[in-house]
Each structure stands twice: as C-alpha cells, then as structure tokens.
Image: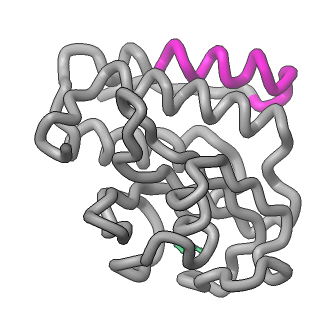
Amino acid sequence: MFSLSANSDIPTEEFYQQLDEQLAGLLSGERDLICNAAQFSAFLMQLVPDLNWSGFYFSRGNELVLGPFVGKVACTRIPFGRGVCGQAAQTQQVQRIDDVHAFDGHIACDAQSAAELVIPLMVEGELVGVVDLDSPVAGRFSADDEAGIERLVDTFIKATDFSWQR
Ligand code: SME
C-alpha cells in the first residue's frame, strides 16, 4: 500500500513541493505511459482538494482521444480548437478557466464542473496530449495551482516513456 499525504493548510508552493516529492517516488521504477498516466490521474484526484475529474487526452492527428482518468465518463474525442482541452491543444498554452459556463465552446462532461485547468503535454517540442483537471468550485485554480500542477506534469513527463504514443 502507498502512504500518500498532503497538507493543504500550507502555502500553495510548499503544498505542491510535497506532492512533487511523493509523485517522483510513486512513478520511480515504472516508465509505461498508460500505467503512469493512470497513476498520475488517481494521485491528483486523491491529493489535490476539490477535484471532480482528473485525467488525460492524447493527440491523434488533429484531435484528442480520451486516455486514463478518474471521474465520470467523458467525451471520447475532441477536435483541436474545440472546448477548453481543444484550445489548450491548438494553442499549446495552459488554459486556466475560473468559470467554464462563461467559456465559449466549453464541452460539458459533468454538469458539476465549474473550473477547469488544462496543461498541454509537450515532449521534445511536440504536443502529445493534455492533462485535464475539473473542479466543482468556481475559481478553484489560482496561478500558484497552475505553477504547481505544471511542476507535477513535468515530473510525470520525465518519469515516462512516450515512444509508444509518438
Ligand atoms: N470540459 C472539457 C472536456 C473534457 S471533460 O471536462 C473531462 C473541454 O471543454 O474541453
């Protein structure tokens, strides 16, 4: 059994520092993409407060296809440019949305979702997919959360072999 813990009463930067150390430990010794993506999704859901969906979409040509995730069933394919995930893929920029209902073209998978954070997965300059986090709390993701999650995504990328996906 893994013993993971997070104290969210500390400054956000420290909180993610603690998570980052635990993530590096969790993924050490395993480089398989599907395995690490599944673990990372569950890790985020377990330790980051107030999430209702955590997971991956992978690039297939000009669209994203659903990968490992934790949460309610979701849409399977998202063309680049559509919704928050498609915008992140097309622009290769992080999308941090306080209120998805005010985002033109948002794709609703879970009516509970209010805030969304989507991080493009860049490997050697190439977009291989996105990490998508949803929260039922509007404005859930601060700039510090964005920086912290980006750091975790970086650790995930370094720990993982993407040759199968690419
Ligand atoms: N809301 C996303 C779709 C994916 S789900 O949230 C899991 C979007 O607008 O791209």
Q: Quadrant of the C terminus?
A: top left
Left or right: residue 137 compared with residue 132: right
Per the rendered image, the range of residues in magenta is 8-22
Q: Which residue is drawn at 44% across and 56% down?
A: 55
Corner quadrant of residue 146 = top right
Q: Where is residue 37 in the image (x, y as percent from the top left)?
A: 32, 43
Q: Which of 69 and 98 is in front in this view?
A: 98
Q: Residue at x 49, y 25 (%)?
A: 154
Q: Nearer the viewer, residue 151 or 60?
A: 60
- Above-or-below relation of 29 to 40: above
- In the picture, residue 10 is in which quadrant? top right
Q: Residue furthest left?
A: 164
Q: Position of residue 142 (x, y in %)?
A: 85, 43
Figure quarter occupied by ligand 1: bottom right
Describe residue 54's horizontal placement relative to residue 9 as left or right.
left
Q: In this view, does 88 lie above or below 8?
A: below
**Magenta part, dominant SS:** helix
Q: Residue at x 66, y 48 (%)?
A: 94
> Quick check: 135 above or below 121?
below
Q: In this view, does 163 lie to the left or right of 123?
A: left
**55 part of magenta stretch:** no
- What residue lies at 35% left-to-right and 22% top-to-bottom? 26
Quadrant (top left, top right, bottom left, bottom right) of the N terminus? top left
Give how far across and how far down residue 110 sits, in percent.
58, 82
Is residue 119 or residue 90 the one in the foreground? 90
Tally of numbered tags: 0
Left or right of 140, for residue 27 = left
In this rendered view, identify the residue nearer to me: 134 or 90.
90
